[in-house]
Amino acid sequence: MAKPYKVKRGDSLYRIAQAHNIRSWRALYRVNHRTVGSNPHLIHPGQVLSLPR
């Protein structure tokens, strides 16, 4: 099961992926496409993302 992560101010998919040893921000985006929407560069504080294992 994926671990949840709550987006904080200043976060980006790239930084979240690096901090959690995810191979790329694109992998993080693929898992969270429905939450993030069509623009992977636009995430909002408070959104809850799933961190893939």
Image (spheres, rainbow, N blue to C red):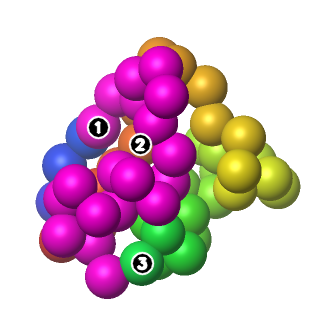
Name the residue rendered at 41%, 42% in the picture. Answer: 49
Where does the magenta region start and end? 5-23
* Mark seen at residue 24: 3
Is residue 17 visible in the rendered image? The answer is yes
Circles 2 and 3, Cβ within 8 Å, touching? The answer is no
Is 24 situated left or right of 42 in this image?
left
User: Viewer-proximal residue, 11 or 45?
Assistant: 11
* Mark seen at residue 5: 1
Is 4 situated left or right of 40 in this image?
left
Judge the density around disc 2: few (<14), some (14-19), many (≥20) Cα neighbours within 10 Å.
many
Circles 2 and 1, Cβ within 8 Å, touching? The answer is yes
Secondary element type, mark 3: loop
Name the residue rendered at 48%, 69% in the picture. Answer: 25
Q: Quadrant of residue 42?
A: top right
Q: Which of pointers 3 and 1 lies earlier in the amino acid sequence?
A: 1
Is residue 2 visible in the rendered image? The answer is no
In reply to whether residue 13 is colored magenta, the answer given is yes
**Marks 3 and 1, how far apart in space?**
16 Å
> Residue 10: x percent and y percent?
49, 28
> Residue 20: x percent and y percent?
19, 59
Name the front one of labels 2 and 3.
Answer: 3
- Per the image, the residue denoted by label 2 is 49
Secondary element type, mark 2: strand
Secondary element type, mark 1: strand
Q: Check disc 1 and give the amino acid type.
A: Tyr
Numbered disc total: 3
